[in-house]
Image (cartoon, rainbow, N blue to C red):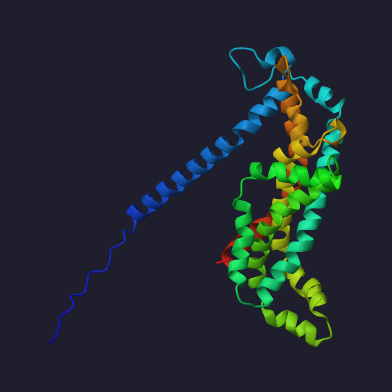
């Protein structure tokens, strides 16, 4: 018994002027969507910048205007005269310290996860990542009592350690995906030349994984820079506050200093923006390679 399979006609793709018009329509739609996305995601920043440049009497004027007239720098002067620079320094110390600790732990862990195989490895990695699924609010009380017993309340150390606990699993997974894309033969060749396993990792694998390391560092830095809940619970004195907690202190009992909050927000964006501009190429490359490699 023989069966006859009828060949389906090949799909006819439009060509010529019709295809050109369709491509042009898709291109215009893509451009419009990109512009709308930029406007939506930058609207808050533009409004904060506008508010920070208005005189105090114009901030709550009705109808509101986007362009300040006249331009006033009183809000910036008021913010920079206080403890805001101290809070910037605190955030820098905590964020940089967290990046150093997280990378110091996650680079060897991710390297070991890609170069050594053992039973239950995948399950263990998922358990580590699942720890991030616990709500951050649920960990505030345990972290507070533990830090209090150790005498670490109101110190840089407690914030660096707590943030590192949160971000190390994500960094391990990101770097693991990138390390998997680097051939094992490269570090094996380095070991044949006399390098130890640790030196082969530092001198061969880590330089090749520089985009992945940069992406992990930037993600950890931004998290530590912006975190609020743990920072407000684990610091007590005004001189130890970080930027997000310091901005919250502009919410006074009898009113909100919108000009100071907006000016402080714009100033606090600058370190993150500069870091992103320096690392943007490696960040995008590392994030993409890490995502694909982890599959």
The residue positioned 78% from the left and 22% from the top of the image is 75
The answer to which image quadrant residue 282 occupies is bottom right
| Image spot of residue 81 (x, y percent) | 87, 25
| Residue 20 as seen in the image, left or right of residue 125 | left
120 relative to 55, above or below: below
In this orientation, which residue lies closer to the viewer: 218 or 172?
172
Q: Is residue 278 visible?
A: no
- Count of numbered circles on the image: 0
263 relative to 133, above or below: above
The residue positioned 82% from the left and 34% from the top of the image is 236
| Residue 138 as seen in the image, left or right of residue 92 | left
The residue positioned 71% from the left and 73% from the top of the image is 112
Q: Can residue 286 be seen in this view?
A: yes
Q: Residue furthest left?
A: 1
The answer to which image quadrant residue 273 occupies is top right
The residue positioned 65% from the left and 41% from the top of the image is 137
Q: Indicate the quadrant containing the N terminus: top left, top right, bottom left or bottom right.
A: bottom left
| Image spot of residue 38 (x, y percent) | 57, 39
| Residue 261 as seen in the image, left or right of residue 97 | left
Q: Indicate the quadrant containing the C terminus: top left, top right, bottom left or bottom right.
A: bottom right
| Image spot of residue 79 (x, y percent) | 82, 26
């Amino acid at each position: 018994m023989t069966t006859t399979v009828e060949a389906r006609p090949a799909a006819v793709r439009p060509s010529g002027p019709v295809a050109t018009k369709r491509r042009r329509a898709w291109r215009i739609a893509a451009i419009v969507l990109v512009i709308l996305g930029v406007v939506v995601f930058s609207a808050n920043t533009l409004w904060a910048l506008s508010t920070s440049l208005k005189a105090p009497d114009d901030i709550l004027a009705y109808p509101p205007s986007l362009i300040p007239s006249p331009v006033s720098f009183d809000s910036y002067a008021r913010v920079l005269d206080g403890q805001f620079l101290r809070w910037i320094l605190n955030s820098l110390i905590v964020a940089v310290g967290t990046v150093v600790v997280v990378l110091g732990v996650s680079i060897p862990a991710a390297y070991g996860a890609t170069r050594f195989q053992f039973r239950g490895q995948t399950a263990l990695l998922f358990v580590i990542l699942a720890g991030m699924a616990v709500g951050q609010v649920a960990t505030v009380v345990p972290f507070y009592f533990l830090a209090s017993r150790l005498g670490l309340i109101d110190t840089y150390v407690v914030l660096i350690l707590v943030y590192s606990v949160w971000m190390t699993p994500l960094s391990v997974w990101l770097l693991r995906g990138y390390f998997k894309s680097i051939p094992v033969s490269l570090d094996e060749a380095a070991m044949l030349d006399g390098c130890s396993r640790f030196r082969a990792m530092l001198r061969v694998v880590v330089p090749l994984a520089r985009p992945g390391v940069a992406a992990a560092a930037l993600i950890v830095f931004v998290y530590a820079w912006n975190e609020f809940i743990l920072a407000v619970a684990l610091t007590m004195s005004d001189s130890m506050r970080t930027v997000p907690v310091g901005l919250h202190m502009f919410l006074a009992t009898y009113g909100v200093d919108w000009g100071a909050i907006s000016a402080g927000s714009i100033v606090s964006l600058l370190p993150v923006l500069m870091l992103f501009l320096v690392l943007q190429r490696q960040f995008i490359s590392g994030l993409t390679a890490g995502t694909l490699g982890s599959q």
